Image (tube, rainbow, N blue to C red):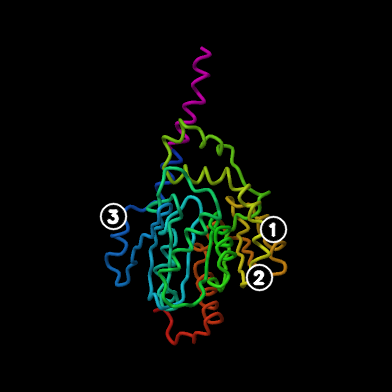
Amino acid sequence: MNWINDIKPIYCLILLCLLLSGCFRRFQMTERDIRSHYAGRSVKPRFHTLETDSTKLFVASIGADTLPPLLLIHGAPGAWYGYLRMLDDSLLQQRYHILSIERPGYGKSRKRRRAVTSINQQALCISQALSLNCSTKPAVVLGRSYGAPIAARLAALHPDRVGHLYLVSAAIDPDKEKFFWFSGWGRMPFIKVFLPRSLNIATAEKYSHAAELRQLLPCWTQLCMPVTVMQGGKDWIIDPGNFDFARRVLANTDARFIYLPDAGHVITSSHHDLVEQLLLNTADSLYRQPALSARRP
């Protein structure tokens, strides 16, 4: 009867794979879902693909390209529509040319089979999205979760093109990389077959992330633009210790730290009104834009 005990772990692994893939699909949108979402809306995104011999970047944009750019970088896994509520925000549309990207390897930004785990390579690729903007104004760059260190690296590479940096639920401390009891299973070839491609890419990023963050350490002293850091006290994905790390490495920077005790991980959705107001205030101060005379109905 020992063979029965031997196959129990295999059944558990298969069950976990099915649960993970099923849960993940709940947060995915198909092309039909996107068409349905925008069917009755007068303002729809424009889609762009920026491609070189080695990189491919898919970008969804909303707003006049003569407005200052707001560049949104998702976490792991993720997609451009993870910022759908911000893209659809009429007040942000009046202030910004909103650019929501799919990071290299994800969605329609897939160029090769192998995941792009380098923070530096991701930042270099994503910076191409700013070429879609015609305003000549510095960008506001917002990175969430695993997208936050990429946003920071992009800002350090292009300090003249970034006017304000937002780090939301930021995974930036190399000593606080959080692993779950099932994390290692996602690296097994047998398991990877059952999982969505984006989840496999996220796993590859996770297991190289600490080393990548250590390479990023010199970057923090190179940031010369204002930085806003936001962290939720009930974030079960990112260790809140990352917030303390941000306080240390940004101690000599023009930085603002916003701790939300009751917030979870996806602050841009759960606290959309707060994020919206912060971005509108940034537009007022950074671009000296007059306040809007009319609010949203």
In the picture as drawn, the residue positioned furthest to the top comes out as 1
- Amino acid type at image mark 2: Ala
The verdict on residue 120 being magenta is no
* Sequence-wise first label, 3 or 2: 3
The part of the image, by quadrant, that contains residue 251 is bottom right
Image coordinates for residue 4, horizontal then vertical, percent: 49, 17
Q: Quadrant of the C terminus?
A: bottom left
Q: Nearer the viewer, residue 261 or 25?
A: 25
Residue highlighted by disc 2: 255
> Mark 2 and mark 1: span between their CA atoms?
13 Å
- At mark 2, the secondary structure is strand
Image coordinates for residue 64, horizontal then vertical, percent: 38, 76
Left or right of 212? Residue 247 is right
From the image, give the main secondary structure of the stretch colored magenta.
Answer: helix
- Amino acid type at image mark 3: Arg
Left or right of 250? Residue 80 is left
> Mark 3 and mark 1: span between their CA atoms?
42 Å
Residue highlighted by disc 1: 245
Of badges 3 and 2, the one in the foreground is 2
Q: In the picture shown, does residue 176 fall above or below 91?
A: above
Residue highlighted by disc 3: 32
Q: Residues within 10 Å of mark 3 (few under 14, many from 20)?
A: few
Q: Which residues are magenta?
A: 1-18
- Amino acid type at image mark 1: Phe
Number of residue marks: 3
